[in-house]
Image: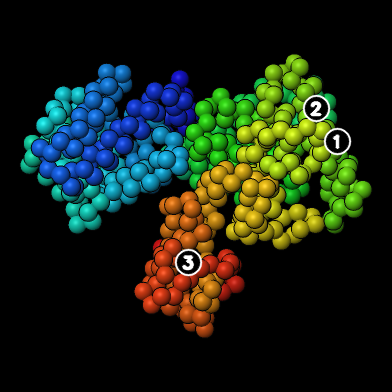
Amino acid sequence: MNISVSAEKIGGSSNFRFSTDKKVIELGKNLINNLISSMKVAQIYDSNNKVFQEHLKGFDDNLREIFRSEGEAVINVTANHIFFNKHRLPMDFASYHTFHSLMDGFLGSEIGEVGFEESITREELTRFVFVFSKSLGDPSKSLEDIEEELEGQGVVRVRLQEPRGGAEDIQGTSNLRKVGKQMYTKSIMLLKETVGDAPSPRKVQTRLVRKLVQNIIDAVIVDETYMLALTNIKNHYDYTLNHSLNVCVLSTALGYRMGMERKRLSDLGMAALFHDIGKIFIPEEILTKPAKLTDEEFEIMKNHPIKGAEMLTQIKRFRKLPVRAIVASLEHHRGIDQSGYPRLFFKKELNLFSKIIAIADVFDAMTTPRIYQKTPFKRDEALGMMMKASGTKFDPLLLKAFINMVGVYPIGCVVLLNTGELAVVMEANQDPDYCQYPKVKLITEKTGKKIDGPLINLAHPASDGTQRFIVKTVDPFKYGIDVTDYF
Ligand SMILES: [Fe+2]
Ligand SMILES: [Fe+2]
């Protein structure tokens, strides 16, 4: 099943698609792996070597299969994604490094597209692999240089194109973003109409909400970065609705990164949107109390998961809400060690939806200003505290993937180092295990004197042996820093 997104549904001009077709994704991923492994082997062996020939055979067979079932074989690369025949390939832990090395190589050579023609022979493919393995990512070679080399080697059935991003595409992206933002605001209004003031399950229009979730998923797939940025819109007057929508965006984005299929993503989105629906039964004065809750009040607050699950069960009777949505409402405060609330008579491993939603829920709550917490936690503080509960409250693998997705230290944020120096984050560490160690540019000495310092990879000690690490993020305005100066 293929679902066209962005074009009509959310207003953009791009015709890239999201595919839930496992076969297409597998063919695409194989193509990427075959291309990379053949190029790597070509750097070591010559074309007559048996090892190289085996790899090339795999590549060639893969291409033939693609032409048979798909009719064409085109790879597109953008700064964030790889597309195969215009289907965006989901990135998981296993493919993370391969994908990123290919993205870096393509974009380093200003190549945005490689298309293979069906009539390409194995000999021509061999010559293509050798030219590509020598030139891809070489900053001294332009797209034209590589094209010339390919032509010189008689490779004429591989087509190269520059990255997308001409005027038309930029226009498309900004349209998409505008519509994305409108959709986000509209979603809150729709939620308010459908669930906000409706304590009766009969009034909850799940069909409309399901449609909303579909739109959110479409937008997350097309422009994840932008949708994640939208979750920074924090409106504490409509806290529960705004929070529910943010949890929905964050959860579906994580689910998508974990390779979930569209139907499950849609169920996950529904579950996330409804995770706090039980709060409509909690008295307003407790929900909006501008101070810490008393023990008694907290006991009442702790009822919201059960109340929510009860309400969703009633909805399910006539609206077919997935069971997992009900379970997630019940479980989202329980923690993977079952130490949270509500206390249940049985211990059962948390549902995957509950584990994902619990992470998105706590992150959004901690980073949002509330009546009783006017200054919210910064995202690195929040993620740092959540890391401490990895394995007890949160699933460690999911938490790691989540941190990698939202970014502890997003590009452009200003950080204080253990040395007293300030630095700007220039590049995220591609390895999820080392996401706390990005590449930074030093911008002040420890005395505070501004400098045009070097780029430093925090994953390694400096040449003089200094091991720098990030102590905290700081507000650039306080230091009179304009981060755009450094980009
Ligand atoms: Fe909750
Ligand atoms: Fe929540």
From the top left corner, tell me how far across and down residue 307 is, in percent: 83, 32
Apparent side of residue 309 relative to residue 284 in the rendered image (left or right): left
Q: Secondary structure at mark 1?
A: helix
Residue ID for mark 1: 281
Q: Nearer the viewer, residue 82 or 101?
A: 101
Give amino acid for label 2.
Met
Q: Amino acid at mark 3?
A: Val
For the C terminus, give its image quadrant.
bottom left
Q: Does the rendering let one see residue 102? A: yes
Q: Is the residue indicated by label 2 positioned so its CB lies within 8 Å of ligand 1? A: no
User: Which residue corresponds to the image point at 55% horizontal and 40% vertical from the top-left?
Assistant: 254
> Dot 1: few (<14), some (14–19), or many (≥20) neighbours within 10 Å?
some
Residue designated by label 2 = 311
Residue positioned 57% across, 65% down in the render: 473
Residue 158 sits above or below residue 339 on the image: above
Query: Hey, which quadrant is residue 360 in on the image?
Result: top right
Of labels 3 and 2, earlier in sequence is 2
Q: Is residue 187 left or right of residue 54?
A: right
Measured Cα–Cα span from mark 3 to mark 2:
48 Å
Q: As drawn, is 103 to the left or to the right of 43? A: right
The quarter of the picture where the N terminus appears is top left
Q: Earlier in the sequence, mark 1 or mark 2?
A: 1
Q: Crowdedness of circle 3 by 10 Å Cα count: few (<14), some, many (20+)?
A: many
* Amino acid type for the residue under numbered disc 1: Phe
Circles 3 and 2: CB atoms closer than 8 Å: no
Q: Position of residue 197 (x, y in %)?
A: 81, 33
Q: Which residue is mark 3?
A: 424
For the residues labelled 1 and 2, say whether their Cβ atoms are less than 8 Å apart: yes
Identify the mark nearer the N-term, 3 or 1.
Answer: 1
Distance of label 3 from label 1 (alpha carbons): 45 Å
Going 81% across and 35% down the picture, which residue do you hit? 344
